[in-house]
Image: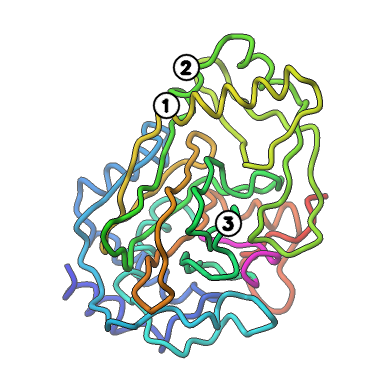
């Protein structure tokens, strides 16, 4: 498979990867999607159609990395650094697998207020984020959550691909909302179906985002529940707080643990699953855990319908705006 990817995608892609302009590389990956095994494509079709809540793929050919090869931070969208340029060789096989799976499910997109508007995210520990509830953390468990829960435009799917993952590998905790609901009392489920709760923007977003109230954490129908959840979720009433506590405990009891090795990929529904990550030891020496992440919308034109055409000459809007209103 690696040779096919090199011939059909990497060898034809223009130059280095661009975290803010994925279109050329991902389009080539999309057109070569049949390189993925049929059983993988079938599972992804089931995820897209709602027959599966998550898909885990292990054993994809991984990029050979130098001992100290790591993302250098120039694409983190922090401190005004340009997110489009790369100073470090990138995991081109990983980008290609990510592009193939992303385009099987929909279209990649991002947020202007997160990581400088990047469409592919490096997920790696950072000293300044070690104890935060963000993808830069390592010293603390990343609590169960759904991605971008505070925003009105949320990913339909989230993809995580393993570039580097030293032993012992931390577990990504994955919870199907249907399993968690079955563990909760009817009163807790009823309470969490009411628009009584508040969620704040995650630490990975730019400062200045306001908390959003009137959140209904559990949606959908009794036979098809959905979830909107973040570690910041809060309620004023004691019964609301009790419901939050019960749901958190219930979700942790039914969590599956997925350990992403190099060449492993996890794709899941952001409305049907919660996810988190166990704490791990980071050394900041170029050998730490490194994942790639994309957010996926089934229909990218939702952004055009909400925000209008993109600024400049772009034909496709790929960024959700800072504010939710």
Find out whether residue 111 is within the magenta segment.
yes
Where residue 41 appears, as percent x and y from the top left, is 28, 49
Mark carried by residue 253: 1
The disc, 1 or 3, on the residue closer to the chain's N-terminal end is 3
| CA–CA distance in space, label 2 to label 1 | 8 Å
The disc, 2 or 1, on the residue closer to the chain's N-terminal end is 2
Where residue 181 appears, as percent x and y from the top left, is 51, 20
Mark carried by residue 183: 2
Mark carried by residue 263: none
Of tags 2 and 1, the one toward the viewer is: 1
Q: Are marks 1 and 3 in contact (CB under 8 Å)?
A: no
Which quadrant would residue 257 be assigned to in this image?
top left
Q: Which of 292 and 309 is in front in this view?
A: 292
Q: Do the residues labelled 2 and 1 touch (CB within 8 Å)?
A: yes
State whether residue 141 is above or below residue 81.
above
* Disc 3 element: loop
- The stretch of residues the image draws in magenta is 108-116
Neighbours of disc 1 within 10 Å: few (<14), some (14-19), many (20+): few
Neighbours of disc 2 within 10 Å: few (<14), some (14-19), many (20+): some
Q: Which of 107 and 197 is in front in this view?
A: 197
The residue tagged 3 is 134
**Residue in view at x 26 percent, y 62 percent:** 263
Where residue 34 appears, as percent x and y from the top left, is 24, 59
State whether residue 96 is above or below residue 253.
below
The disc, 3 or 2, on the residue closer to the chain's N-terminal end is 3
| CA–CA distance in space, label 3 to label 2 | 27 Å
**Residue in view at x 51 percent, y 26 percent:** 249
**Viewed as shown, does residue 249 lie left or right of 54?**
right
Which quadrant would residue 212 be assigned to in this image?
top right
Where residue 10 appears, as percent x and y from the top left, is 30, 80
**Colour setup of the view:** rainbow
**Residue in view at x 27 percent, y 79 percent:** 65
């Amino acid at each position: 498979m690696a040779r096919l990817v090199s011939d059909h995608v990497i060898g034809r892609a223009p130059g280095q990867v661009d975290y803010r302009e994925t279109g050329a590389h991902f389009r080539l990956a999309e057109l070569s999607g049949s390189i993925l095994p049929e059983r993988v494509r079938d599972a992804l079709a089931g995820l897209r159609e709602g027959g599966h809540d998550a898909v885990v793929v292990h054993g994809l050919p991984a990029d050979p990395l130098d001992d100290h090869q790591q993302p250098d931070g120039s694409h983190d969208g922090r401190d005004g650094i340009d997110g489009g340029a790369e100073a470090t060789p990138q995991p081109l096989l990983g980008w290609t697998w990510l592009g193939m799976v992303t385009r099987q499910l929909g279209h990649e997109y991002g947020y202007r207020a997160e990581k400088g508007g990047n469409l592919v995210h490096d997920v790696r520990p950072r000293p300044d984020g070690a104890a935060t509830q963000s993808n830069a953390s390592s010293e603390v468990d990343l609590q169960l959550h759904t991605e971008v829960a505070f925003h009105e435009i949320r990913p339909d799917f989230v993809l995580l691909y393993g570039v580097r993952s030293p032993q012992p590998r931390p577990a990504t905790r994955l919870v199907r909302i249907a399993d968690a609901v079955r563990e909760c009392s009817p009163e807790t489920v009823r309470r969490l179906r009411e628009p009584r709760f508040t969620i704040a923007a995650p630490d990975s977003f730019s400062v200045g985002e306001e908390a959003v109230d009137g959140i209904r954490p559990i949606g959908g129908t009794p036979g098809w529940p959905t979830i909107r959840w973040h570690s910041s979720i809060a309620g004023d009433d004691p019964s609301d707080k009790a419901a939050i506590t019960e749901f958190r405990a219930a979700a942790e009891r039914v969590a599956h643990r997925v350990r992403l090795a190099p060449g492993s990929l996890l794709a899941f529904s952001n409305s049907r699953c919660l996810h988190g990550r166990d704490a791990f030891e980071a050394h900041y020496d170029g050998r730490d855990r490194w994942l790639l992440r994309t957010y996926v919308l089934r229909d990218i034109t939702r952004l055009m319908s909400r925000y209008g055409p993109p600024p400049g000459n772009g034909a496709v809007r790929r960024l959700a705006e800072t504010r939710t209103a």
